Amino acid sequence: MTTNPISRRWFMQDCGVGLGSIALASLINESAASTADDPMAVKKPHFPGKVKNVILLFMAGAPSQFELFDNKPELAKFDGQLPPAELLEGYRAAFINPNSKLLGPKFKFAKHGQSGAEISELLPHTAKVADDLTIIKSMKTDAFNHAPAQIMMNTGSQLFGKPSLGAWSLYGLGSESRDLPGFVVFSSGTKGPSGGSSNWGSGYLPTVYQGVQLRSVGDPVLYLSNPAGIDSRVQRDSLDAISELNRQRLAVTGDPEIATRINSFEMAYRMQSSAPELMDISTETQSTLDLYGVKPGDSSFAKNCLLARRLVEGGTRFVQLFHEAWDQHGNLTKDIKKNCLATDQGCAALIQDLKQRGMLDETLVIWGGEFGRTPMVQGGGNDGRDHHPNAFTMWMAGGGMKPGITYGGTDDLGFNSVIDPIHVRDLHATILHQLGFDHQRLTFKFQGLEQRLTGVEEAHVIDNILA
């Protein structure tokens, strides 16, 4: 028996590479779309949720809160002096000697909007949407190196092999999109995230729920276009034959990974028409393109923000944008300014765009990194900060959050979260709550245990930030 070249190429794709990763997005086939055993069928949550979609703007590398959102006049006052000894008791830094001199904020702050939110001069576009933001200044985490901290922020654990937040969202709710993946990932900046694909993996959940990484220029997925000599009829006949063989094997073994493989072929087939349409931002109005500051054909974080809006508009459940560029151990002043120029307008435009289309209420937008930066200096020229898990800032918008508030706070030097501290587990519990889930009841049995995103340690929904 001869095998069609394109079918063979699709079949040989690994589940984490190229078209194989498209498997992680939709249905076994159109005829199975309404069946109860469809893993991507839309499901009811535990209770009516406020959120249908989530867009996570992940500033990988950990942006400095002192230069962006957490204004500390006292830190500026004691710039160049040693921190109090009692503050450092039991403290472990990633690289620096904890007994390093304090470093004051590098940029000016001002109050914005009716809420009076204090926002750095580096974020003029974000400042314009201050009254739409729920700013949390008291975040904390358990990890102080990039890969484990990124994985913890995205999966609830520092250990590899756990399902990501996006995977849990798909597992719980399914996807409303028939022609696009339910969980999509974009990456921009100087490199990918330190935690790699574990940040959007499915862990012990079926691989149908893991994120699909799309490219923002060219074919969104490699080998999406047909090679010369292959028309849609030949392709369809080949897929039907392979799918039938796979179904026969699935009926014998019940292996969910065979269903995932069938999904891969069918989703790839549908995406040959849907994906190019998604990526063609020339169909947007000029005012929308100007809002984001993007041009058709260009690749940028801002374009990824626009694509995120287009995806959730098309029914994609979870979109995650990674921008890996924020690890300023040195050259803080220059590099953080560059990072803000690359991301500020896109983030603000996304909120404005969703709001004017009536989509912000049902879409939760989240901004933040894996941890914060130290109030002590690192690097030559007094121009760098080390990793810091004790205190950092994130913000959320839409999705049933209280707009125009600043929640929690740090001590005078920004060293510890002291007012309403929020752990990563609390953040996850709150996101699941907005999706309609009790985080203790959204579980998957694995290795004899009912596993969950928030693990076995205590976690609380942050009720005071909910509208």
Image (tube, helix red, strand yellow):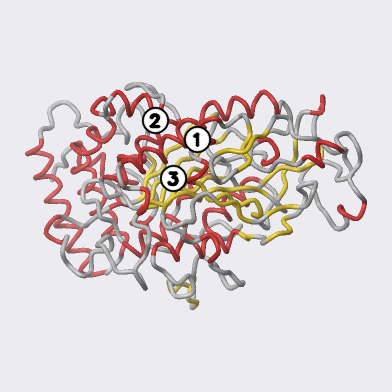
* Left or right of 328 in this view: 130: left
Sequence-wise, which precedes: disc 2 or disc 3?
2
Q: Mark 1 points at which residue?
A: 128
Residue at image location 17% in from the left, 55% down from the top: 29
Element under label 2? helix
Element under label 1? helix
The Cα–Cα distance between marks 2 and 3, rounded to whole angstroms, is: 13 Å
Q: Name the residue under label 2.
A: 303
Element under label 3? strand
* Left or right of 97 in this view: 213: left
Q: Mark 3 points at which residue?
A: 320
Sequence-wise, which precedes: disc 1 or disc 2?
1
The amino acid on which the numbered mark 2 sits, given as a three-letter code, is Lys
* Left or right of 334 in this view: 360: left
Q: Nearer the viewer, residue 446 or 361?
A: 361
Crowd tier of the residue under label 2, counting other residues whose Cα lies within 10 Å: few below 14, some 14–19, many 20 or above: many
View extreme (front): residue: 114
The Cα–Cα distance between marks 3 and 1, rounded to whole angstroms, is: 23 Å
